[in-house]
Amino acid sequence: DAKTTQPNSMESNEEEPVHLPCNHSTISGTDYIHWYRQLPSQGPEYVIHGLTSNVNNRMASLAIAEDRKSSTLILHRATLRDAAVYYCILSMFGGGMNRDDKIIFGKGTRLHILP
Amino acid sequence: NAGVTQTPKFRILKIGQSMTLQCTQDMNHNYMYWYRQDPGMGLKLIYYSVGAGITDKGEVPNGYNVSRSTTEDFPLRLELAAPSQTSVYFCASSRGLNTGELFFGEGSRLTVL
């Protein structure tokens, strides 16, 4: 399985943008890049995912490098509620009942938001 | 719409006891997963299933068993509980990985004494 590398922790000020980096230098052409976050005492929740193009949704933006060896999750205006562990994950495109379809979580980045 | 439901939410076991963690989803998802999360750590994949009748080992399958007789249910069984299995267990489901999102249950906190 392709691996990801994330900083252990980051800090950001409230109401400022946050850029969370992820390196995945061994990514294959069929790997999707997923981001999840886990708030304290909760299960993980989906944030965003993409393959090649940058993606936006109501929660965040995902910027993917042209060579796909790195990506950045962008929170446009951090709030205290965004304090969580953020996981960057690669998963193979299965397209059906492919037994290699699984998502492996790493250690993630713990994001601290300063008021 | 209930999503992914896990039971029980909390359980204390004695060493050597057995139990089953139940997981049910009502979204007709083919893919289901069991993860465990030790304190202060990330999630480790125990078992997963890409459809009814199909299960595969994840990163840390030892000491656990699963079955997937229906699309909705994916129970996780601990046969001989050990203190090392003290953890929070999360069940998740998804329609398909390329379509995004895993939906997680609220977790089951298991303590083995």
Image (cartoon, rainbow, N blue to C red):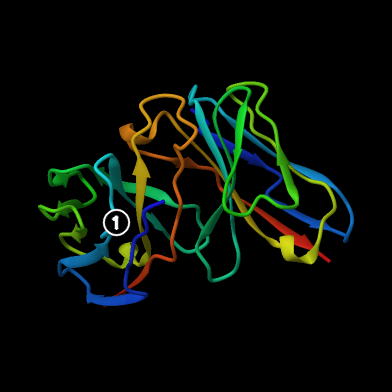
Q: What residue is shown at x 32% (from left), y 32% (from top)?
A: B99
Q: What residue is shown at x 13% (from left), y 47% (from top)?
A: A54
Q: What residue is shown at x 63% (from left), y 41% (from top)?
A: B6
Position in image of residue A70 (x %, y %): 20, 59
Choose between B40 and B31: the one closer to the eye: B31
Position in image of residue B85 (x %, y %): 73, 60
Choose between A73 and A40: the one closer to the eye: A73
Q: Amino acid at mark 1?
A: Thr
Q: What residue is shown at x 78% (from left), y 66% (from top)?
A: B83
> Going by the image, does A17 lie left or right of B5?
left
Q: Is residue A59 above or below residue A15?
A: above
Q: Which residue is mark 1?
A: A26
Residue A9 image-quadrant placement: bottom left
Using the rendered image of the protein, determine whether residue B9 is visible from the camera's viewpoint: yes
Choose between A6 and B13: the one closer to the eye: A6
At mark 1, the secondary structure is loop
How many numbered discs, if any? 1
Position in image of residue A41 (x %, y %): 53, 61
- The furthest residue to the left: A66
